[in-house]
Image (cartoon, helix red, strand yellow):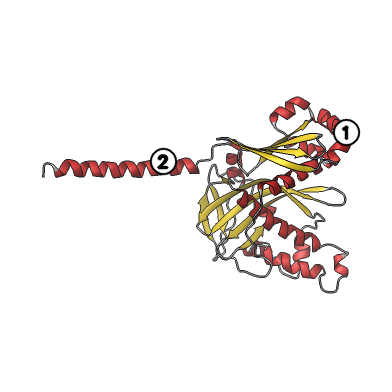
Amino acid sequence: MKKVLPISIISILLVLLIIISVSVNNNKRNIPTDNKVNEYNELINDIDNTDKFKQKTTGKVQKITSISDYELAYICISKFYNYYAMMYDEIINENPIYNNDYYSQKVYNMLSKQYKEKYNISKDNIKEKLDKIEYLNVEIYTLYYITNYEDSKVYYIEGLLRNENTYEIKDFKNIVYINNANQTFTVSLENDIKESVIVGNDVNYILDIDIEKNEDNTFSYPKTSYEEFAERITNSIRHLVLNNPEIAYKLLTDNSKEKYKNINEFKAFINENRRDLFLFSYDKIEKTFTNKTFTIKVYDKNSKFIIYLFFDSFSNFKYEINKL
């Protein structure tokens, strides 16, 4: 017995040490480490939890670390807004079948059940209840998610809707609910995100676990390459630089902002190089990974510029334009 007792005590101590170690490591993974994450932890807060089909949960905003997660969010929100714009398109409405009412039904099918019930949205009044938009291109600049269930996740998305003809833009913020089990999604709009309540690092939200599958709210998992991803992001930047320099300036790295000193000097650079920026054509990329950052170097076929995309995750990015 004298020999067994010390061995038992040592075994118990080893088990306790393992448990403590796992707990500490899990906490480290869940604690947001940059200011942007904390900012969005304060931004997203609880949505009405009166729906019996929803479960109120608490989680923490997490960075997107996978290109497939980014692309999945992009596919879902692009699908939603493309139909949303068609719901108000007067030319489309001349079609006896694929008219505004046809697309109204699709948008209705993609809105979350909680959103429709909370704002009394029906198939008949959806066009009156939602704001009219005329924007067809979707560009994401901020993306976070919270995972609380094995088969479900919630995305928080910020971005721009761009009119293909006039280049007019409109900001948007959305929550997108994903059910991986049946490959469905639903969307809640900006007015369902209550920005006035600060909840610190915790995020209270309703996980839409009862997504009813229909012909419109399904998705296929993306198979996007880094090349395709970089080309789309670069094209979005080019459009912003040429047509919305104020927003493009905000997305520059701090080093670039110091180089241009102010927005007026950045606009002067754009005007001096407008033709070459307009003709910028994606050629190839180089990827660089470090412990803290991921960089994509995008080359111009015309050998006029190199655009650098800097990511600390796929949740947001900064860029630089270097003239050759």
In percent of width and height, residue 260 lies at 78, 27
Three-letter code for the amino acid on which mark 2 is drawn: Val
Image quadrant occupied by the C terminus: top right
Q: In the picture provided, is 72 more to the left or to the right than 92?
A: left
Furthest residue in direction left, as rendered = 1
* Residue placed most toward the observer, 121 or 287: 287
Helix, strand, or loop for circle 1? helix
Would you identify the image quadrant in which residue 288 lies? top right
Furthest residue in direction bottom, as rendered = 96
Q: Is residue 25 above or below residue 147?
A: above
Helix, strand, or loop for circle 2? helix
Q: Is residue 266 above or below residue 3?
A: above
Would you identify the image quadrant in which residue 86 lies? bottom right
- Kindly report the distance in space between the C-alpha atoms of the residues bearing marks 1 and 2: 53 Å
Three-letter code for the amino acid on which mark 1 is drawn: Asn
Residue 24's mark? 2
Q: Look at mark 1 in the image and give the residue it sits on.
A: 271
Q: In the picture provided, is 121 more to the left or to the right than 51?
A: right
Characterize the local packing of mark 1: few (<14), some (14-19) or many (20 or more) Cα atoms within 10 angstroms: few
